[in-house]
Amino acid sequence: MTFMKSLLGASAMALAAGAALAEPAIIFDLGGKFDKSFNEAAFNGATKWATETGGTFKELEMQSEAQREQALRRMAESGANPVVMTGFAFGDVLNTVAPDFPDTKFAIIDMVVDQPNVKSVVFTEHEGSYLVGMMAGLASKTGTVGFIGGMDIPLIRRFGCGYAQGVMAANPAAKVVLNMTGTTPAAWNDPVKGAELAKGQKAQGADVIYAAAGGTGVGVLQAAADEGILSIGVDSNQNGMHPGQVLTSMLKRVDVAVYNAFMEGVDLKPGINVLDLKADGVGYAMDDNNAALVTPEMKAAVDAAAEKIKSGELVVHDYMSDNTCPAATF
Amino acid sequence: MDYATLLQLLDSTLRLATPLLLACLAGLFSERSGIFDIGLEGKMLAAAMASGAVAFLTGSVWLGLLAGIGASLIFAAIHGIASITFRGNQLISGVALNFLASGLTVLIAQAMFGQGGRTPPLEGAARFNPITLPFAESVQGVPILGPLYYEVISGHSILVYAAIALVPISWWVLNRVGLRFAAVAITGILCGLAGAYMATALQAGFGREMTAGRGYIALAALIFAKWRPVPALWACLLFGFFQALALRPDVVEAVVRVKVPVPFLDALPYILTVIVLAGFIGKAIPPRAGGEPYVKER
């Protein structure tokens, strides 16, 4: 529906202003536009751009794995520029499609694609996860905390590894229980399994659970709230989903990445763009919903660690640099 | 593996086996009356969406449950008309209904709530909350049996107990009711219960494709149980146990002392079903009239 509307809008604008004004476009990955997490953050960034500039953008939600290349080509052929896509899974497809549209600029989030017309935006999730891991370690009363990932890929292990390091930094005796939801993209959207995993982790003693699992996280946060333990959201600020029961959220500013790409428009600068803690690309969320859960001491400890990471004094090990993790085994 | 871990696994087993059991009994009625029903999955999905939406709008889980059963009954009626009245191919009708449910649920939920095909989260009375059985707290101290009663048997939503009570009822009804339309309607009601359980008890709302193939696992359990109600209970509990095990790879590793890949645990129910179908453990003979359109003799 919205896609049709924006298509109609596009043709109307093309009639009025000629071909000079290209619309930006965004393609959402399988978790869906309203996953309350990764894709929703991207959508929020695009919406922010639209309200600030008064512009319109095209959007497309993927429904199945098979649509990937078709979706990308369709967007590029429709004249959209730049075309932004969310998710590592677009990497291979973009590598083959980008050379076919040399005049179109592409931006991909969470993956590096080496093409002259592609901007690759990556985040240092291990740094943000380290901070929420510290908070989990400080908030846990049982000394056991949990991590539930979505699809078992190196990127998600990077979240888990950073988290485990943070937990250990706050409480060296702590135990971290790690689970992955699955090995296929369906693992991004299986809240029932997420909830059951959370209950299993609680049975193992975990009283704080960090979900880095897209739409599956909705089930994790729900189960944690049902069981009366704390959870940690991811990507978007999920503190408000269960006020007073979500300890914090690991913010990954996908919205900023999309907003910036749309702002640059057709002049999008190709290359790799790393959004780290220093650039406010990652962080943790504080608001009214979790103010009572985070003590001033916890906040001070986490902020101190954040300063050390920014200054380079503290280096959080990146799982993807060598596929090993000093603090956890996957 | 200690006793507490075992109890946690069994607790998880019961939760996960309930939708399987309801769907399996649904398939049992349909297939014993001669109507193959591939569409269990679709009916569950439709029921999950309807119950999630209505429970949210009215704030009453019971109205949600009714809506779920209603939605599932509509699907069952279409299947019945296609395969009984018009003597169509039952497999094709079932598959078509699955596709219809997969798309329609997301479309309707998106049109109603605009949250990407998800229904808004349910709270309080809009959900089936766990109920504590009588004496659960007081017998907790009794060794072995006390924790078993408290952890595993008590503390589930009412639909879990309903599902188990339905096993003897199914056995009784099967020996008396023979009409195909009645059987298809019962199938609809049971799938409705299964879907409502998923959206209002196990989870707090409907999500896209949330049944995740449970309708097919239920069909496998039905074959495994050789189309009989009491074995169906054991088959579903066994499959539920495998699902619970797949969530705890650490326990499996501790018991068998070898790292077992999680996908293998996920696949176990299917592997077992194939073994049964191949005739290694007894013989699974489907109901004789299955799939045959029935014409009344005069």
Image (cartoon, coloured by chain):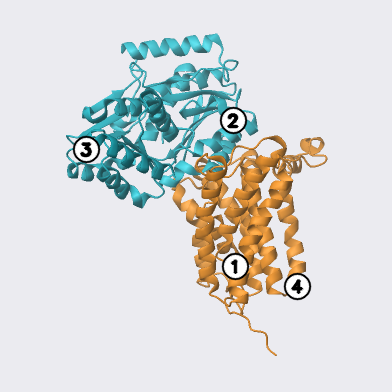
Q: Position of residue B286 (x, y in %)?
A: 59, 74
* Pointer 1 with pointer 3, Cβ within 8 A: no
Q: What distance separates the C-alpha of mark 1 from that of mark 2? A: 47 Å
Q: Is residue B233 visible?
A: no
Q: Residue at x 18, y 38 (%)?
A: A103
The answer to the question of whether label 2 and label 3 lie on touching residues, with beta carbons closer than 8 A, is: no
Chain B display color: orange
The chain coloured cyan in the image: A
Q: Are marks 4 and 3 on the same chain?
A: no
Q: Name the chain under label 4.
A: B
- Viewer-nearest of discs 2 and 4: 4
* Placement of the C terminus of chain B among the 4 image quadrants: bottom right
Residue tagged 4: B177
- Residue labelled with disc 1: B79
Q: Say whether marks 1 and 4 touch (CB < 8 Å).
A: no
- Give the mark, 2 or 3, whose residue is nearer the N terminus: 3
Q: Position of residue A69 (x, y in %)?
A: 29, 48
For mark 3, what is the residue?
A104
Do the residues at pointers 1 and 4 share their chain?
yes
Q: Relative to residue A312, is residue B30 depicted above or below?
A: below
Pick the front one: A233 or B224: A233
- For mark 4, give the secondary structure: loop
